[in-house]
Amino acid sequence: MRTPVVAGNWKMHGSRAENARLIEALAAEFPDEPRASCVVCPPFVYLQDVARLLRDADLGVELGAQDVCADTHGAYTGEVSAAMLKDVGCGYVIVGHSERRLLYREDDKLVARKFAAAQGRAVTPILCIGEQLTERESGRTESVVARQLDAVLELSGAEAFASALIAYEPCWAIGTGRNATPEQAQEVHAFVRGRIAARNAKIAAETRILYGGSVKAGNAAELFAMPDVDGGLIGGASLKADEFLAILAAAGRG
């Protein structure tokens, strides 16, 4: 039985005051025994602050970062290593988010190296994969997703997914108000699981695959009802306590 995960990607939002209010609001209504795991990923500068807020609130919510350097140390101005993330309390890190791939030209090889760097310091990577609208419309969804996934499989092997999450995020459904239908999400999630299963069926059966792309309280339950959808990577809705809690509740009903 795969425990669902709901991860909040705060992106470049928040302030110390706003973050404190958000955690306080989450704490006020957080379930005593949630049936889904929960992670929040604030910007780098707020990681230690949010780590303290989460400890004080004692919710069992885990801390994640939004990116990591592929190298372990050195003269890389502005970068943050996996060891540094671990040092400030991060258990998770997002790698290969579509915004990093599109806006900052991160290719599959670099994303695979970031994935490996995170695991090298016992930080669980959340590997983001997904196609652009033109790629979906031209029938290339599976080939794009396969290429992105294969880069990690070739570098780290299928066994690496025993301690990793995957997030399928169709680029055309991020921050657009559009989202894949539950059936579209399930189709890609099943394809991803099958591709891992071709190398290791046991690992594939245990790998948690999240859906990311305009998940809201109103559509979370039907998305999470799909057999291969194991939770969500949540963007804007993770900044609203009531929305995020509703999504968390929906993930735990499966």
Image (cartoon, rainbow, N blue to C red):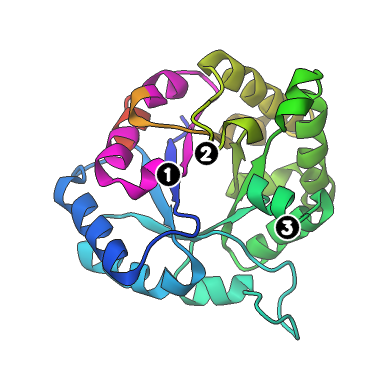
Q: Which x, y percent locates residue 238?
A: 38, 46
Mark 3, other Cα within 10 Å: few <14 / some 14–19 / many ≥20: few
Label 1's element? helix
Asked if residue 235 lies in the magenta stretch, the reply is yes
Query: Which residue in the protein does label 2 denote?
Result: 175
Residue drawn at (61%, 34%), measured in percent from left and top?
Answer: 168
Residue type at tag 2: Gly
Mark 2 crowdedness (10 Å alpha carbons): few <14, some 14-19, many ≥20: few
Give the residue drawn at x 44%, y 46%: 7
Whether the residues at callouts 1 and 2 have beta carbons within 8 Å, the answer is yes
Question: What residue is shown with label 3?
Answer: 104
Disc 1 target residue: 236
Q: Which corner quadrant of the image does residue 42 belong to? A: bottom left
The location of residue 112, given as percent across then percent down, is 77, 53
Q: Outermost residue toward the left? A: 28
Quarter the C terminus occupies: top left
Number of numbered discs on residues: 3
Q: Is residue 248 magenta?
A: no
Few, some or many residues within 10 Å of mark 1 (<14, 14–19, 20+): some
Q: Earlier in the sequence, mark 1 or mark 2?
A: 2
Amino acid beneath label 3: Tyr
CA–CA distance in space, label 1 to label 2: 8 Å
Q: Is residue 77 above or below residue 71?
A: below
Tell me the magenta residue range.
219-247
Say if residue 199 shows up in the picture: no
